[in-house]
Image (tube, helix red, strand yellow):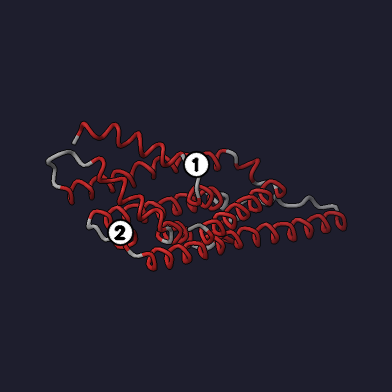
């Protein structure tokens, strides 16, 4: 087993480094604070582990065998992506409105506007960020099919497949948790820049457009 760990972790690094919907969502939720970012990471990695378990038991083979099941899940995943994108675009619009109101108040009374930093209260409870990460991962049929094709390649010859794949799935989730924690830390370190209203609004707009585009692409692809 130890002979497969280094290649497996290298593959996990390449997978995590490839930008995708999870990366966009984690960065966006991190704008509300480090705890929300980490809650999103934990939700996403719970989904990774779940798909690993499903693949270990061979259940994701149903998605590859049934076109109807795969298409249904693909459409559901597209809806989830678009919904998250719309939420980000609405957040950008609210920030623009709030920024305009602060600017108007400053012109009237000369008071300095408060910074538009990441508002954890507006992001809701931490479980909302956790559910967002979990839902985004579980709604992606590509994640299921990928787990089915990815994990068996690293099961050592002669090793029991089920416990080996479960162990690899757990290691995959733990590794990605550490990797994405660096994203959360990076956003937190750039707090002064991110807390500027114009920057925060632009980040919300970009993440919203990216999520909507990814959702449309998932819905249209064969």
Q: Residue furthest right?
A: 108
Asked if 72 appears above or below 209 in the picture, the reply is: below
Q: Is residue 149 above or below residue 189?
A: below
165 relative to 91 in the view: left or right: left
Does 66 sit left or right of 73 as displayed? left
Q: Is residue 218 visible?
A: yes
Residue shown at 39%/63% (left/top)?
70
Within the image, what quadrant is residue 13 found in?
top left
Disc 2 secondary structure class: loop
Q: Position of residue 93 (x, y in %)?
A: 70, 60
In the displayed structure image, the side of residue 118 where residue 59 appears, left or right: left
Q: Is residue 46 visible?
A: no
Image x and y of residue 217, in percent: 55, 56
Left-right relation of 43 to 195: left
Sequence-first disc among 2 and 1: 2
- The residues bearing labels 2 and 1 have C-alpha atoms spaced at a distance of 30 Å
Residue at the spot 75% in from the left edge and 61% down from the top edge: 97
Pick the quarter of the image with the N terminus. Answer: top left
Q: Tell me the residue at 21%/31% (across/down).
A: 3
Q: Which residue is painted at 15% across and 39% down in the image? A: 157
The mark found on residue 183 in the picture is 1
Residue occupied by mark 2: 60
Q: Secondary structure at mark 1?
A: helix
Q: Residues within 10 Å of mark 2 (few under 14, many from 20)?
A: many
Front position in the image: 22 or 113: 22
Q: Which mark is residue 74?
A: none
Q: Nearer the viewer, mark 2 or mark 1?
A: 2
């Amino acid at each position: 087993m130890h002979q497969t760990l280094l290649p497996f972790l290298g593959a996990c690094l390449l997978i995590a480094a490839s930008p995708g919907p999870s990366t966009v969502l984690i960065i966006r939720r991190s704008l509300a604070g480090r705890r929300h970012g980490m809650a999103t990471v934990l939700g996403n990695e719970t989904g990774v582990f779940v798909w690993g378990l499903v693949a270990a038991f061979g259940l994701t083979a149903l998605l590859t065998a049934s076109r109807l099941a795969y298409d249904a899940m693909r459409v559901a995943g597209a809806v989830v992506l678009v919904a998250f994108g719309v939420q980000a675009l609405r957040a950008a619009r609210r920030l623009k409105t709030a920024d305009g109101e602060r600017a108007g108040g400053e012109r009237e009374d000369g008071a300095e506007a408060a910074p538009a930093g990441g508002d954890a209260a507006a992001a809701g409870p931490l479980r909302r960020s956790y559910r967002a990460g979990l839902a985004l991962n579980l709604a992606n049929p590509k994640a299921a099919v990928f787990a089915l094709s990815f994990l068996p390649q690293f099961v050592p010859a002669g090793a029991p497949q089920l416990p080996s794949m479960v162990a690899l799935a757990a290691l995959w989730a733990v590794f990605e948790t550490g990797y994405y924690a660096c994203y959360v830390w990076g956003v937190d370190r750039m707090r002064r820049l991110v807390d500027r209203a114009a920057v925060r609004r632009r980040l919300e707009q970009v993440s919203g457009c990216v999520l909507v585009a990814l959702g449309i692409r998932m819905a249209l692809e064969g």
